[in-house]
Amino acid sequence: MCRVDAPPQRSYTHSRWIRSELESVPCSATRTVTRRIPLSTRTYHSTGAVSFSTKGEYGVRLMAQLARRFGTGPASLTDIAEQESLPRAYLEQLVISLRDANLVQSTRGAHGGYELTRAPEQIRMGEVLRALEGPIAPMICASDDTVHTTCERTGYCTVNFLWIRVRDAIIGALDSMTLADLLPVPARLGQLNKPILAALTDLSAGAAISSTSATAD
């Protein structure tokens, strides 16, 4: 067996890495034979169909972390950045959009930070992605923004129907999920049990007051 000791060759085509590696093949003592085995054999000329940017990806991860901490007070962006291995400076930019959309609120001070304005089960993922990415629009002619720019072909284009169906499918998927759906099961159960625990606490307090009044009488 012969092998050429060389690192994997990498080439960059638009947004995708195409890698090839060298494989050992039988050869004679005086002949070197190498064969490249492509790990990806197809190139693409875009970032992918209907893809979200890092604003959407990192922003959703940020919101999921805030959902896990809901009810415990403001959370530090530094802690979240370390937990998610994300740049803190980038998170600082994302929370501006989330705050403008009234999804998060900030608290200043030594123990300040960010927290959700509503319970995780009350925040739909469609709200989150629109705040981070803007209107859901697989094509310019199929935006869910009522004031979007219209295409010059709108009046007679028959392809528009496809993009509207794609848009509606994406919106339906996003709006059918809430932040609570992204929580681990134990954390999700804890969020659901909070109202029950609060009600039990109120009942216990009421019973204690009644007992005290009865004793005094």
Image (spheres, rainbow, N blue to C red):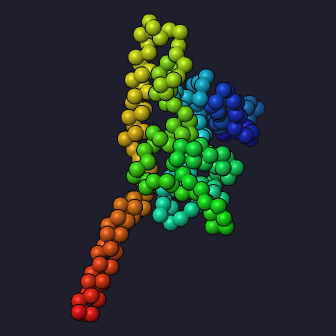
Q: Quadrant location of the C terminus?
A: bottom left
Q: Residue at left 29%, top 75%? A: 203
Total numbered labels placed on residues in the image: 0
Q: Residue at left 70%, top 30%? A: 11
Instruction: Give the left or right position of residue 58, taking residue 176 as reference.
Output: right
Q: Nearer the viewer, residue 11 or 198?
A: 198
Q: Residue at left 39%, top 59%? A: 188
Q: Nearer the viewer, residue 166 or 98?
A: 98
Q: Position of residue 48 (x, y in %)?
A: 55, 28
Q: Position of residue 50 (x, y in %)?
A: 51, 29
Q: Residue at left 57%, top 47%? A: 99
Q: Nearer the viewer, residue 91 or 205?
A: 205
Above or below for 5 versus 120? above
The residue positioned farthest toward the bottom in the image shown = 216
Residue 132 image-quadrant placement: top right
Q: Is residue 212 visible?
A: yes
The residue positioned farthest toward the top in the image shown = 156
The residue positioned farthest toward the front in the image shown = 217
Above or below for 157 versus 49? above
Q: Is residue 33 visible?
A: no
